Every structure is written in C-alpha cells, then in structure tokens.
C-alpha cells in the first residue's frame, strides 16, 4: 500500500461523533442540549463528538435513552471505528518498516513459503516480523545484534546479520515441529556407533535416519538449506528454556565430509559444554572460545579423522592408476568404517589428490536438503 492510499483511508475515516451529529440534526437537537440530556458538560461533549473519548457502555446506554437508538448500535459503531484506527496505525507502522526488510533474503524466504510471493513491501514487512516473532525491527535488532537474554551471540559485527539470523530462525521454527524423547548423555555416548553406521553406509533416506536417531536421543537435528550470504556451517545451542539441545546444519558446499565433521563438532558442544552457550561454526567475525572449539574439533576428528600415513599411502599411486587408488580407498573405507566420500575429501584437503580429479570425485556424495 502506497502512502497516498494510506492518506486516502485516513480521509475516509468516519468517527462515531459524525453519526451522533447527524442523528441530533435530524431530531432538531443541538449539541449543547444533547450534553444536558446526557449529563455531560461542554468539554466532555466536544471530546465525544470529535472522537477524543470512546463510547463506553454507560454512554451507549444514555444515548439509547436520549436518542432512541439501541445501545448495541453505538457500541458496534465504536468497535468498528477502533478497528479502523487500529488498521491505520498498523499501516503507518508497516510503512516505516519498509526500509528494514531490504537486506533480508526475501527471495529465499518466498521460495520456501515463509513469506508471501508478493512485491508489496507492506505485506512483506508484516510477514517478516511474524516470521521472527518480534514486535518491531528494534526488537529484531535487540535480539540478534545486541546483548540479548534469548540469544547469546551478537551478530552486529558480521557483514550479513539479516541472512545469518534468517538461517538461525529457520532452525528455531524447525525445532517446534520435533517430537523428542528425553535427552540422555550416557545413551548418546553408547550409541555413537549408530551415527557412524549411517555415515558409512547411508540409505536413500539417510538424512531422515539421522534425524530420527537424534530424536530418539533427545536432540533436535535441524537440516536447514544454505541461505544466501550466510557463511555458516553449523550451530549448537539449547532452546525451549534450555530444555532442548539443538544441532543445526547447512548444506553449504554440498560436501559429505564437511557435513559429518560439522555434525560431530556440534554434537561435542552439546555433550561437553554449557547449556547457556551458543556455538556458531563458520563465522570468522564472531569471537568464540578457542579451547572449546578445539575440543569440538578433536571430538569430530576422533571419529572421522584418517591417519595421514593412510592417506599418503593412497596418494602414492599415480593418477593414471586410478583403479588401484579406488581399490585402496575401498579397503581403507572398510577398515575404518568410513564412507569413501570422506576419504576422498580428506585426500583433497591434504592436497594429496587434486580437487578436479574426475575419477575420485565420482566417489564423493553430494549433500543437499530438500526442505
């Protein structure tokens, strides 16, 4: 809605006092006489006629006695007027929000049905506020960019807080849909092997298998597609008054090895660190506890790390001898209970084979979320 349309709606606004004046004119009663009959002085009558005071139950009852029109009519008239005032105030407020929405990933949110598919900035502003469950842009800024009780890491030093907060908010909304059993740290430690089995031999539904296993162990696993301009790989935090541990991962870079390393990294934060902490992986502009990050990396490497000597042994075969390389990768995969995709990615990360090796890349799995 444009500003001119908003002004037009203001001009068309009719206050209950207009109806009162029209009624007494038809009855041949002056405003002063009406005031006497209602028991209101000149000042109070002026406020009533000009919409400065509302028609209360008492005033509606008196208007019925004096003008012969039922009290319910006056109360309904007042209610309709207040509804119009509310709508106008809402439109004025949303007009002021239009500049706020510019840096958010609107196209992404529209594509995933979180915002209406429209160019109307008024509608988009309202939908974005509801998406974040905040009363105004100030509350969004207070929560995500300032020191907040509900969100422990300030994004004000990042270049794209709008995109990062969008990805994080999608995780929060996803958690609301989860049915989880009680969190039990001891059960998780006993069942680590089940995570590794999913990683080693993934079914066509491996992402759902992983979600289900996490839910059985009391962890909400949120697989949220990569949001444009949100350079983040994962997050670990506790939501719902610190009762729900949440691991949130992205499909950024689509790499199977990165996905699983991030999973075990965030799992370490849930198992080893405090509930009131928030851990975000991949945001260089945010200073985080390096000791805890190192501990999480070591935890992930414990399950996914491959001895450098084993990798070097594979790389010793020349590129043209790709069949032997593949055979050695298969043997190492079975020996370590690790998917071949992870072995290839680590070979490339250590620069033992090139990233553009077509034959080796055929062994890699692509991670992409559909939700």
Image (cartoon, rainbow, N blue to C red):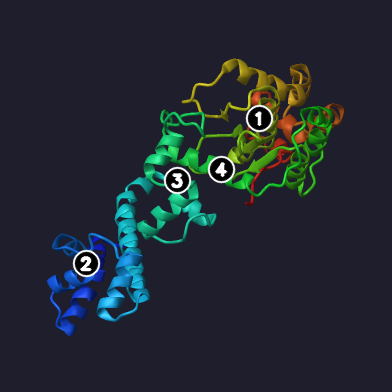
Mark 1 → mark 4, Cα distance in angstroms:
17 Å
> Is any atom of residue 160 visible in this view?
no
Residue under pointer 2: 39
- Counting the numbered discs, the total is 4
Residue 354 vertical placement versus 66 (above, below)? above
Label 1 neighbourhood size at 10 Å, few (<14), some (14-19), many (20+)?
many
Name the residue rendered at 62%, 38% in the picture: 248
SS under mark 1:
helix
Which is closer to the viewer, label 3 or label 1? 3
Judged left or right of residue 76, residue 14 is: left
Of the image marks 4 and 3, the number of the one nearer the N terminus: 3
Image quadrant holding the N terminus, namely bottom left
Image coordinates of residue 342 in percent, x first then y, are 73, 32
- Pointer 4 with pointer 3, Cβ within 8 A: no
SS under mark 3:
loop
Residue under pointer 3: 134
């Amino acid at each position: 809605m444009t500003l001119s349309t908003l002004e037009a709606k203001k001009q068309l606004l009719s206050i209950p006092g207009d109806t009162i004046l029209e009624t007494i004119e038809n009855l041949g009663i002056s405003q002063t006489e009406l005031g006497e009959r209602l028991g209101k002085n000149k000042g109070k009558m002026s406020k009533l006629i000009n919409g400065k005071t509302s028609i209360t139950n008492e005033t509606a009852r008196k208007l019925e006695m004096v003008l012969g029109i039922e009290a319910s009519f006056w109360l309904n008239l007042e209610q309709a007027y207040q509804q119009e005032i509310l709508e106008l105030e809402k439109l004025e407020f949303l007009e002021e929000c239009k500049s706020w929405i510019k840096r958010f990933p609107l196209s992404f949110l529209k594509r995933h049905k979180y915002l209406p598919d429209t160019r109307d900035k008024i509608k988009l502003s309202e939908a974005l506020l509801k998406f974040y469950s905040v009363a105004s842009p100030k509350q969004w800024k207070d929560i995500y960019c300032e020191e907040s009780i509900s969100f422990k890491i300030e994004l004000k030093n990042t270049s794209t807080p709008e995109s990062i907060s969008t990805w994080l908010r999608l995780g929060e909304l996803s958690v609301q849909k989860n049915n989880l059993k009680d969190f039990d740290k001891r059960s998780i430690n006993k069942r680590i092997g089940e995570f590794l089995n999913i990683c080693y031999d993934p079914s066509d539904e491996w992402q759902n298998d992983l979600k289900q296993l996490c839910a059985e162990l009391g962890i909400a696993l949120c697989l949220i597609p990569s949001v444009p301009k949100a350079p983040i790989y994962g997050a670990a935090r506790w939501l719902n008054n610190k009762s729900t541990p949440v691991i949130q991962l992205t499909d950024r870079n689509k790499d199977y090895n990165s996905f699983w390393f991030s999973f075990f990294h965030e799992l370490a934060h849930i198992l080893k660190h405090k509930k009131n902490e928030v851990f975000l992986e991949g945001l260089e502009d945010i200073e985080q506890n390096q000791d805890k990050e190192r501990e999480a990396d070591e935890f992930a490497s414990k399950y996914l790390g491959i001895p450098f000597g084993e990798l070097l042994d594979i790389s010793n075969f020349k590129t043209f001898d790709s069949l032997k390389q593949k055979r050695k990768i298969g043997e190492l995969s079975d020996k370590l209970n690790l998917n071949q995709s992870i072995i290839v990615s680590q070979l490339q990360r250590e620069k033992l084979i090139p990233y553009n090796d077509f034959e080796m890349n055929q062994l890699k799995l692509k991670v992409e979320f559909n939700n």
